[in-house]
Structures are given as structure tokens and as C-alpha cells.
Image (cartoon, rainbow, N blue to C red):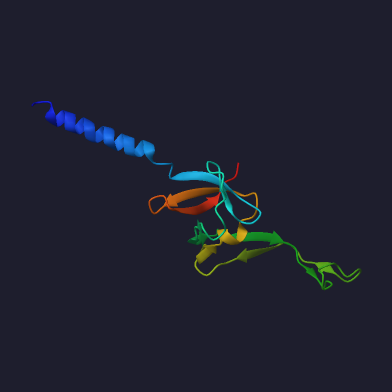
Amino acid sequence: MANTGINKLAQVIASRIAQQAQRPDVLELGTIQADMSLLLDRFPVPIPAGDYLIADWLMRLEIPQASRVVKTASPVNSDGTDIPGTTTYSSLQRLDFQTGDPGQVQDVHLNLKASLKAGDRVLVAWVNDGTDPVVLCKVVT
């Protein structure tokens, strides 16, 4: 009788381990095909475009304040080239590039879907009990 609790605990642990071992990986790699289907490394049949999801990223981008030291030229042609014998240059000047909120741009949208192309390696997460694949990002070496 004293071992009943220990045996029950061992059975529960063994059951949980068996369940985890039977589940496929939650993350896996794949390749975008020419027709924009998704071919997973461990499954030989491509998932058609539209039958998989693509993550959409919305974030705040922080851009450091920037300054550049330049010489200006005036007058110049419309393409920016010097006008021979006329263009003169200033002494060194500093240009400061400012943003509204120092260093932050609100609501930057990274459109992964628009940038996916044939041959891209991608990281795929399975959600909804492993029924829906979601492309999270490109994977590079």
C-alpha cells in the first residue's frame, strides 16, 4: 500500500513523457517554392499558398539621432553635378537629422509576406493543436 502513491506518480510521469514523445516538433524549417507553396523539411507534400499563415509584425522602431558633416555646393545641375566654372563649395557644416519623438518611429509594419520569395528558408510554428502552420520569419545562415 505504501508504494501506491509512488506507482501512480510514476504512471503519470510515464504517460506525460509518452504524450510528449508522440507530438511532432512545434517549430520546423521549410522552403518557399516558386508557386509560393511551403515545402517543409520533414513532409514531402507542399502546403499551397493560402493554406498556411504568415506572421505580421508591428513594432516601434528606434532610430538614433544622426548628424553628418558636409560641404554644400551651389549652384548645381538638376542631377546634382557641378556647373563648370560656376559651382562653389561652402566650408564644413553639420546637418542634424531630427525625428518627432527623439529616436522613435511609431507603428512600423514589417510586411514579411510581401518580401517572401521562392527559395527563402523559413521558420514555421504549428498552432491550434498542430493544425495550422505559421511562417514566423526567414532563416539565414
* Front residue of 108 and 33: 33
Q: Quadrant of residue 92?
A: bottom right
Give residue 77's position: percent from left, percent from top: 84, 72
Of 17 and 58, which appears nearest the observer?
Answer: 17
Task: Look at the image and tell me in which quarter the C terminus lies.
Answer: top right
Name the spot of residue 70 as percent of width and height, x first.
72, 61
**Residue 45 placement, left or right of 81:** left
Q: Is residue 44 left or right of residue 8?
A: right
Query: Which residue is more in the foreground, 56 or 64?
Result: 56
Q: Position of residue 99 (x, y in %)?
A: 55, 67
Disc count in the image? 0
The answer to whether any part of residue 102 appears in the image is no
- The residue at the far left in this view is 1
User: Against 94, is 33 above or below?
Assistant: above
1 or 64, nearer to the observer = 1
Direction front: furthest residue: 45
Q: Is residue 62 above or below residue 21?
A: below
Question: What quarter of the picture does the N terminus occupy?
Answer: top left
User: Residue 41 appears at what percent x and percent y?
Assistant: 55, 42
Q: Quadrant of residue 132?
A: bottom left
Q: Residue furthest right?
A: 85
Q: Quadrant of residue 49?
A: bottom right
Residue at 17 percent of width and 33 percent of height: 8
In this rendering, does residue 77 appear at all? yes
| In this view, 48 is above or below 85 | above
Could you tell me which residue is drawn at 32 percent across and 35 percent down?
A: 18
